[in-house]
């Protein structure tokens, strides 16, 4: 009977109604998705290259001028104990994977002769944000492999404008997969306006939808050659000029957000990828010991600021252990997507800190560089000899510290007094924690990506796979 009733025109009408309902349902779901995605905040991460803890006004410099970064700081939260790795590629790998670089397979700087880079199986920060409806872009230095297989657009970015490795290694400027310009000379500030144009263009193009912009400035990496606009503009010679140039870039991005009326709905993160290069007129690690290339605090503790109007309390400071590994899970929490559940991720969401919520116990009790150092609360134990980073500088030859040294960072932030002899129980506890962490890491680490045939030096044809003009 039913079958008879829906024969002929009636059946056609029901079918039509059904199709219309389906279209309405799809449209509703799509519109709801758009509305939901549109409510999510934009995320901008400004990562500098080798900027020290003391290389900005709001972190205590009295000779470097950073008025825009200081303004960002006044409007947001300072993270005083924010950790990274001691050099470029590992920190960037940790940012993209939410994992210590040791876990994600690479603790060295990646050079253009290397045939390694971020592994295809890694689940990256931009890949996760894309599942939440974000458009993703990176401008500046990638430094996770120079081959096509490692290009940022193969790892979650919709847009890439910048360099695959350090400028001083000799590289090119890429737009997505295409190498559009060769760079034969060392780093200088002449690229800043082009990078800013690309970043501001990305903001303008995506102002109506949630976006993630990773601005990886190549400054203040050596050699310190500021853009013409900034030569001899600072109180403290060339290095100060370069820092002013960074500050200008931050200010221009802040202005772009204001101009498009989206600053209120944007989380702006500022951090450095590792400590400073010390030397004549070099960087400054503030109260911390040494700089880049070491696991002394000066090498791995960097300035970090986060601004998010309405969520982050202006002018506040968070003194807990946090780090670059936390950005992936934090952004996942903000975008309401799950971090990958099929692997170990070292980072944790620090959204409760950003919201100034009461937290029963610290999100991280320790920060560990496997086989090197462990910080647990106020204590820091070295499990191998730490040498000074780089060459001697204006301060003369800097000393090493032997394995077994214990420092009380609260009383002695500069790591000057070894108190291990007075604190055997603390030493034993930290050593035990380190051993556990190393065992766990060995059981759950992942490989770095290798280009097919990378281990065969005769396979010259691999070079064809590098992006060309
Ligand atoms: Ca660096």
Image (cartoon, rainbow, N blue to C red):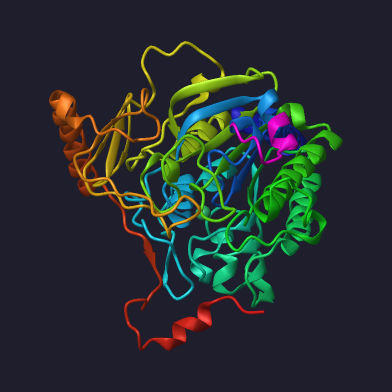
The answer, for residue 408, to whether it is visible in the render is yes
Position of residue 408 in the picture relative to residue 23 (left or right): left
* Quarter in which the N terminus is drawn: top right
- All told, the count of numbered labels is 0
Please say whether residue 359 is one of the residues in the magenta stretch.
no
The question of residue 70 being in magenta is answered with yes
Q: In which quarter of the image is residue 23?
A: top right
Instruction: Answer yes or no: is residue 1 visible.
Output: no
| Viewer-proximal residue among 381 and 131 | 381
Q: Which residue is drawn at 42% across and 72% down?
A: 114
Q: Which residue is drawn at 44% across and 40% down?
A: 325
Region in magenta:
60-71
User: In the visual, does 54 lie left or right of 368?
Assistant: right
Residue 412 picture location, percent across and down = 36, 28
Q: Is residue 19 placed above or below 192 in the rendered structure?
A: above
Q: Is residue 404 left or right of residue 322?
A: left
The percent coordinates of residue 339 (x first, y second) are 44, 37
Q: In which quarter of the image is the C terminus?
A: bottom right
Q: In this view, does 285 lie to the left or right of 1?
A: left
């Amino acid at each position: 009977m039913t079958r008879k009733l829906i024969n002929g025109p009636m059946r056609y009408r029901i079918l039509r109604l059904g199709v219309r309902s389906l279209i309405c349902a799809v449209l509703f779901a799509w519109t709801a998705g758009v509305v939901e995605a549109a409510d999510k905040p934009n995320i901008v991460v400004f990562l500098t290259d080798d900027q020290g803890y003391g290389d900005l006004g709001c972190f205590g410099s009295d000779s470097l001028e950073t008025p825009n970064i200081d303004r960002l700081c006044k409007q947001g939260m300072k993270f005083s104990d924010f950790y990274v790795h001691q050099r470029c590629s590992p920190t960037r790998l940790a940012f993209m994977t939410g994992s210590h670089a040791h876990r994600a397979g690479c603790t060295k700087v990646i050079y253009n002769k290397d045939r390694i880079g971020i592994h295809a199986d890694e689940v990256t920060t931009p890949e996760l944000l894309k599942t939440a409806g974000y458009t993703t872009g990176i401008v500046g230095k990638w430094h996770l492999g120079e081959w096509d297989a490692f290009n940022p657009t193969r790892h979650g970015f919709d847009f890439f404008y910048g360099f695959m490795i350090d400028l001083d290694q000799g590289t090119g400027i890429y737009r997505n997969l295409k190498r559009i310009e060769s760079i034969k000379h060392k780093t200088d500030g002449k690229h800043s306006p082009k990078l800013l144009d690309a970043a501001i263009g990305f903001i303008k193009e995506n102002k109506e939808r949630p976006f993630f912009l990773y601005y990886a400035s190549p400054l203040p990496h050596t050699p310190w050659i500021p853009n013409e606009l900034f030569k001899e503009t600072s109180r403290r010679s060339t290095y100060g000029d370069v820092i002013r140039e960074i500050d200008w870039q931050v200010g221009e991005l802040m202005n772009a957000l204001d101009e498009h009326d989206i600053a209120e709905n944007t989380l702006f993160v500022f951090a450095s990828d590792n400590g400073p290069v010390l030397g004549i007129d070099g960087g400054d690690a503030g109260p911390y010991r040494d700089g880049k290339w070491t696991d002394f605090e000066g090498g791995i503790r960097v300035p970090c600021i986060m601004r998010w109007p309405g969520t982050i309390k202006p002018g506040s400071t968070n003194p807990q252990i946090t780090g670059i590994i936390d950005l992936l899970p934090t952004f996942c929490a903000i975008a309401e997507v799950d971090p990958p559940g099929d692997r170990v991720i070292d980072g944790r969401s620090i959204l409760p800190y950003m919201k100034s919520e009461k937290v029963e116990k610290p999100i991280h009790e320790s920060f560990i560089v496997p086989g090197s150092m462990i910080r647990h609360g106020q204590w820091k134990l070295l499990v191998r000899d730490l040498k000074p980073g780089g060459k001697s500088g204006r301060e003369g030859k800097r000393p090493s510290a032997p394995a077994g040294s214990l420092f009380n960072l609260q009383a002695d932030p500069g790591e000057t007094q070894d108190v291990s002899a007075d604190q055997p129980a603390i030493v034993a506890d930290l050593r035990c924690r380190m051993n556990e962490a190393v065992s766990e890491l060995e059981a759950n680490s992942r490989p770095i990506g290798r280009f097919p045939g990378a281990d065969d030096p005769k396979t010259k044809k691999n070079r064809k796979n590098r992006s060309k003009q």
